[in-house]
Amino acid sequence: MTAVLRLFWNICLLRDGPETVPTQTWFLSTLIVAHLTISVLVFRVAYPTLSPLLALNWAFIGLAVTLGIAWFVLYLRNQEPRFPATLGAIVGAKVLIGALMSLMYGTLTGKPLQSGGWILTIWGIVVVGFILHRALSTRLWIGIVLSVVAYLMGVVVAQSVLGPAISASLETVG
């Protein structure tokens, strides 16, 4: 367990790339379930009136868009065999950053909470960019641009699909 945490921590610190991640189906499936679970917890703490199912859909859409873009750019460069390791690295890093975000939500309030959330979000975007840079054997800035595009597309798709439901859920607070 500590070896897995150390692996993803080193990826989050931009030391190791996706090539070091195990690609067994059970491992990747476990990472996806862990990511969706942590994301639902973070969304529920950040937005208490959000239903668990809506939070799950929101997290799933963001993950699906990011992984879809990762697969597509790997496909364009004829490197799609690298996708399982890239998937594992992206999802594992998101699990670790999501866990840090859930700990932060449990200890901070007000402005430090908002600032910390943005810092962790930006860190996550940079980490995904680093992973894409290593998977694609390209420059780091290209990976980060792809990561920003994936993040923004995830937001747009989630708002397009779930926007009315999210708005209705969040308006029940007022």
Image (cartoon, helix red, strand yellow):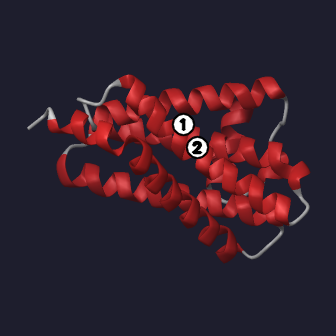
**Which residue is farthest left?**
174
| Left or right placement of residue 13 versus residue 29 in this view | left
Give coordinates of residue 171: x percent, y percent: 16, 38
Q: Amino acid at mark 1?
A: Phe
Q: Secondary structure at mark 2?
A: helix
Q: Please say if the residues under marks 1 and 2 sit with CB atoms less than 8 Å apart.
A: yes
**Residue 16 can be seen in this image:** no
**Residue matched to label 1:** 60
Gap in angstroms between the C-alphas marked 1 and 2: 5 Å
**Residue 171 can be seen in this image:** yes
| Left or right placement of residue 79 versus residue 5 in this view | right
Give coordinates of residue 78: x percent, y percent: 91, 62
**Vertical placement of 25 versus 128: above or below?**
above
At x 76%, y 57%, the residue is 72
**Vertical placement of 48 versus 6: above or below?**
above
Give coordinates of residue 106: x percent, y percent: 30, 33
Q: Nearer the viewer, residue 111 or 52?
A: 52
Question: Which disc number belongs to residue 48?
Answer: none
Q: Secondary structure at mark 1?
A: helix
**Residue matched to label 2:** 63
Q: Amino acid at mark 2?
A: Leu
| Count of numbered badges drawn on the protein | 2
At x 83%, y 65%, the residue is 76
